[in-house]
Each structure stands twice: as C-alpha cells, then as structure tokens.
C-alpha cells in the first residue's frame, strides 16, 4: 500500500452517479428513476487489483460499465491519467477504449459464433492498427500462448470450446488491445471451481507480466481475498467501505461489511461450528426508492435514529481505510 501511495492514480472516480429512467405500469404510464450509482468516489492505482463486492443489484457492474463509458454517467468525473472521460464524444473516446478493456461474465455471448477464435482475437488488432497484417497471425498465436491455449485453437469456433477455454479467449481478446486497465465483471462466476482457480492464477500471471490494473467485480469473498490489493464494499449504489485487503478482512468497520465477511465459510470445521454469523434481516430496498439517511439502516442491527435521517459522510477512518458509517466515527465499535 505504501508503494501505491507514492504513485499517481491511473483512474480517479469523483462523485460518479448513474440514474436510469424506466417506465412502469402495463402501458408505461409511470416514470421512475433507478438510483444505480450515487456519488461514488475512489482512486485506482497503477498495477493494483481493486475488487468491488456486494449483493446483487448494489451497482458493482454498473460502476464498471460507467467507468468504461459503456453507460454514460448522469454526473461525476472519470479521470484517466488526468483526462476526464465523462464528457468526451465517441470519436474522442476511441483511443481510450483501446486502453480500457473488459472481460464479461459470459464469454460465449461476447464471441461471434461465425468467427474462428483466431479471427476474434485478430479483430481488435486490425481495428486499432496495432500490427501490420503480416504480423497479425504471429501475434494471435502469442496471445493464445499467453492464456494457455494451443495454437491450433485459432481455427476453432466458440461452440467447440469449454466455458473455461472460452473465457481464456475473452482474456486474449482483451489483451490484444494492449490495455492498461481491465474490468473483470464476474469473470469467473459462471465457471467450475477448479477452472475458477486456473483463471484467477492466469489473471495474476498476466498482471505481473504486463503491468495490468484490474477492477475485479465478484461475489466470492474467498476469491476476492486471494486476488485483491484493496476492496470496496458497495450497498445500494454507494460505497460503504474501502480498505486494503488485509485490513478490511481483519478489521472491518461497517456493519454491512461485517455481515458479508461472516458469511464466508472457514476451512476449519471446529471453528466454523463455533463462530457466530451476522445474518441480515429483510431485503435490499428498491433502488427506485432508496431510504433516507444511511441506506443500510433498514437492515442494520445497530442503526440509531441518526442513521435513519442523516446520510453518513465518506471519511478516512485510518490511513487508506475509508468508511461511510456514523457508528465508525470513533474508529469502530
């Protein structure tokens, strides 16, 4: 963390907000606003893996898509190497899109079934003019080798590959653009556990080899603990806590973070039987009508009257450890 603190952020997310306008009713007669993201701010340092965790619908994927400008933000700034991407048109964004890539959860839906694997990997190389046509084949072969696939797979089609192999192709396709930053959007959640471990180790190896920076979106906290440099915990469109990995897992400050971590199974059966889990009651409120005050207060066992009416301030509780919780203002419970 000290090394990261001495460098300039690769990305600075400032007040990022994304609202979706939707129509409700049988004939769409009513309009509502989905608060997918509200005032989200954090930095992403070069070479780190910032993981984003939280329950389904908390805004994890929306944050990744909005940072990449796949969703245009409602408000806020996305500074990449000092340049605000939020206001740029498609033409101005094109050179940045090459450097900011994404690996989706379902690789099959992102690959053209009519293109061979070699053609799919070659496409971004040709589009961005990253190599002469005569060198494209050798570059594709090198990328296949980087992700652990034999060269002969270049002639195969997506339906001929397993899920893990297709995800390796998706990683190779992202690498073909020579990116600096990659959003991994639930990139392993659809894979078998044994294959997940292989893909995680591959991502770590590629990060070391090419100096990549990851935004890793996931549900599995055991995987997050293995791969992360820092971890951001999101709840209902806001970041509740952000800290270095070991500090967040060892000394969480937000009640929501504690509840999430208590759900992670332990390898020691004796310890697992004795420990007490913090089971949250109720459901996540609708993002179309988020509660006043702290958005977690409707499910928080420690909520006070202040939590119900006053939004907690995003603050640095200790160096590198940020939290938005009234109860943590004195350094935790």
Image: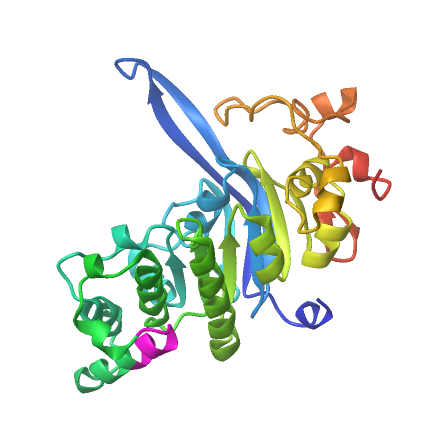
* Residue nearer the viewer, 106 or 273: 273
Asked if residue 90 shows in the view, the reply is: yes
Please check the rendered image and state whether residue 248 is part of the magenta-colored stretch, yes or no: no
- Position of residue 95 relative to residue 330, above or below, is below
Report the residue at 18% width, 63% height from top. Answer: 157
**In this view, 32 is above or below 17:** above
Residue 39 image-quadrant placement: top right
Outermost residue, front direction? 270
In the image, residue 60 sits, relative to residue 123, either above or below, namely: above
Magenta stretch? 142-149
Name the residue rendered at 73%, 69% in the picture.
Answer: 2
Colour scheme in use: rainbow
Q: Nearer the viewer, residue 320 or 310?
A: 320
Question: How far from the left and from the top, in percent, is residue 185?
Answer: 43, 52
Q: Position of residue 132 (x, y in %)?
A: 21, 84
Furthest-right residue in view? 330
Residue 177, given in percent of the width and then of the height, sits at 33, 71
Looking at the image, how many numbered discs can be counted on the residues? Answer: 0
Q: Residue at x 47, y 77 (%)?
A: 210
Q: Is residue 14 visible?
A: no
Q: Is residue 313 above or below residue 99?
A: above
> Looking at the rendering, in which quadrant would you find the C terminus?
top right
Residue 147 lies in the magenta stretch: yes
Q: Would you say 61 lies left or right of 230 here?
A: left
Q: Residue at x 64, y 58 (%)?
A: 230
Quadrant (top left, top right, bottom left, bottom right) of the N terminus? bottom right
Q: Residue 48: x and y, percent?
A: 58, 66
Secondary structure mostly seen in magenta is helix
Position of 240 compared to 12: left or right? right
């Amino acid at each position: 963390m000290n090394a990261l603190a001495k460098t300039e952020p690769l990305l600075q997310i400032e007040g990022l907000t994304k609202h979706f306008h939707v129509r409700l009713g049988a004939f769409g007669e009513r309009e509502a606003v989905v608060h997918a993201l509200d005032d989200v701010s954090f930095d992403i340092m070069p070479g780190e893996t910032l993981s984003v965790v939280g329950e389904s619908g908390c805004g994890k994927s929306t944050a990744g898509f909005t940072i990449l400008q796949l969703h245009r933000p409602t408000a806020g700034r996305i500074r990449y190497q000092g340049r605000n991407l939020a206001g740029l048109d498609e033409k101005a964004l094109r050179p940045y899109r090459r450097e900011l890539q994404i690996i989706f959860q379902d690789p099959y839906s992102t690959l053209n079934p009519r293109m061979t694997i070699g053609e799919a990997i070659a496409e971004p190389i040709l589009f961005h003019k990253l190599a002469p046509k005569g060198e494209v084949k050798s570059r594709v072969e090198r990328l296949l080798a980087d992700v652990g696939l034999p060269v002969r797979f270049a002639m195969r089609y997506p339906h001929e590959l397993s899920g893990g192999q297709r995800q390796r192709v998706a990683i190779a396709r992202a690498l073909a653009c020579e990116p600096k930053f990659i959003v991994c959007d639930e990139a392993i959640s659809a894979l078998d556990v044994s294959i997940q471990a292989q893909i995680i180790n591959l991502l770590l190896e590629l990060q070391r080899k090419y100096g990549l920076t990851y935004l890793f979106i996931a549900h599995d906290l055991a995987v997050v603990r293995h791969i992360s440099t820092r971890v951001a915990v999101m709840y209902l469109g806001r970041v509740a806590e952000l800290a270095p990995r070991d500090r967040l897992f060892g000394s969480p400050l937000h009640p929501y973070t504690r509840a999430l971590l208590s759900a992670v199974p332990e390898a020691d059966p004796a310890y697992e039987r004795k420990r007490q889990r913090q089971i949250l009651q109720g459901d996540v409120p609708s993002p179309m009508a988020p509660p006043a005050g702290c958005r977690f207060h409707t499910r928080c066992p420690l909520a006070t009257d202040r939590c119900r009416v006053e939004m907690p301030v995003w603050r640095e509780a200790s160096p590198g450890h940020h939290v938005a919780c009234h109860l943590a203002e004195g350094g935790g419970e």
